[in-house]
Image: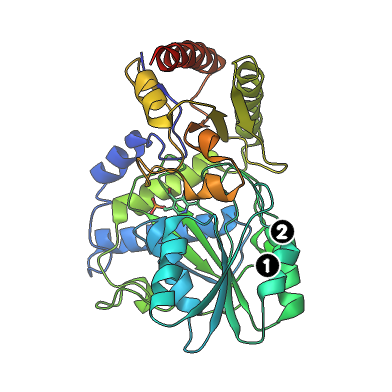
Amino acid sequence: MEIYLDNAATTKPYIDTVTAYHSKDGWYNPSAAYKGAEAVFSEIKKIRQTLAQSLGARDGACVFTSGGTEANNMAVLSGWRKGGHYVTSTIEHPSVYVMFKHLEQQGAQVDYVTPRGFHIEPEDVAALVREETALVSIMHVNNETGALNDIKNIRREVRAKNSNTLFHADGVQALLKTPIDIYDLGVDYYTVSAHKIHGLKGTGALLALNGRTIKPVLLGGSQESVLRAGTENTLGIQAFGEALRRGFADTATLAHVEALRSALIFGLGKIEGAVVNIPHAFVPHILSVSFEGIRAEVLVRLLGDQGIYIGTGAACSRGKVSRVILECGIKRSLADGTVRISMSDNNTADDIQICLEALEKAVRQLRRFSHRG
Ligand SMILES: Cc1ncc(COP(=O)(O)O)c(C=O)c1O
């Protein structure tokens, strides 16, 4: 038995599509001058349009990257200017947060907004914006709690304070998990990643709207309109296109995942000492839950040994208590026992019931053990 409930870390790829593209010469170098290569080049162009459409964009630039991390780094650097000031939040993914910490070391001035509960509030962001603020970067959906930030209003308040300030949103956990109209959000830069929607790892994109420029991070060849040097990840991009097409505007899938989430919340409510961390606005596929007096890694391992895979907060901060969870005001003893259960359209109601039973048993066992100790 294998029940995979760590879909915010990564999703199972549609491997059949990769094999299909591979067998029809989708691996040619798109910069080459023969027919098959030109076909790959135009396929990539089409996928760029598919991605833009899935976000409601009609124009703007879209650069394929090695994932969400590179796209986030690129967005921050695109908004960077000498002497500029930046605003971000303390609950951003490390690919934004650590990038700003790095720029701070280089002399940039950065202010960090803290959340109220699980969310970043528009007025708190606007309060930090000043005349020299070059860029604000606030994530659309938090990867540890599933909290959906009100980007539209945050953007509006930022613009009211300074109409020259650029705005970036990390949409890695939002893509296909909530309806997105990128013009309505009003952002200048938006980040997405393929492996969170059944694409392959190592593929993402940065979109730039309103005529904003993307500053290349990788220099060399003239691929991606000279915005990102390096031979394109053709298979990754093609698999991204297919993942977008399969998941396009699929409200039935969202309703299915939402029903799983409700069943999960209901079941967790019956486990003694479980505190479900519920944001007031959320995406359905991520649920954070804390267990008092229990270490998250031990719980995750116990379930893993039974073939049930859940996560401890962010996949990339293994072993450490989560900065994000602490910033959301969860006390240390609960933060230590916080796990993330994240679903996809592949999961069933049975998966949730089996996971709940295993959690209940494991929590009871760990409590008994700690009382004895
Ligand atoms: C919110 C968020 N931003 C960025 C990333 C980084 O994306 P990638 O793994 O494609 O580099 C992740 C991945 O965990 C994420 O959840």
Residue 71 vertical position relative to residue 130 in the rendered view, above or below: above
- Position of 186 with respect to 20 (left or right) is right
Measured as percent of width and height from the top left, residue 175 is found at 55, 49
Cα separation between marks 1 and 2 = 7 Å
Q: Quadrant of residue 287?
A: top right
In the rendered view, does 153 fall on the left or right side of 251? right
Which amino acid type corresponds to the residue marked 1 in the rendered image?
Val
Tell me the SS state at disc 2.
Answer: loop
> Residue tagged by mark 2?
121
**Residue 170 is at least partly visible in this image:** yes
The residue lying furthest to the front in this view is 373
Q: Position of residue 339 (x, y in %)?
A: 48, 32
Question: At 38% from the left edge and 30% from the top edge, which residue is drawn?
Answer: 297
* Residue appearing at x 42%, y 75% in the figure: 103
Numbered badge on residue 142: none
Choose between 278 and 171: the one closer to the eye.
Answer: 278
Give the position of the C terminus as an image quadrant.
Answer: top left
Residue closer to the observer: 71 or 315: 315
Relative height, residue 360 to residue 26 (above, below): above
Residue pointed to by mark 1: 125
* Element carrying mark 1: helix
Most foreground residue, 14 or 160: 160
Q: Residue at x 26, y 61 (%)?
A: 37
Q: Residues within 10 Å of mark 1 (few under 14, many from 20)?
A: many
Image coords of residue 30 (percent x, y): 28, 64
Cβ atoms at labels 1 and 2 below 8 Å apart: yes
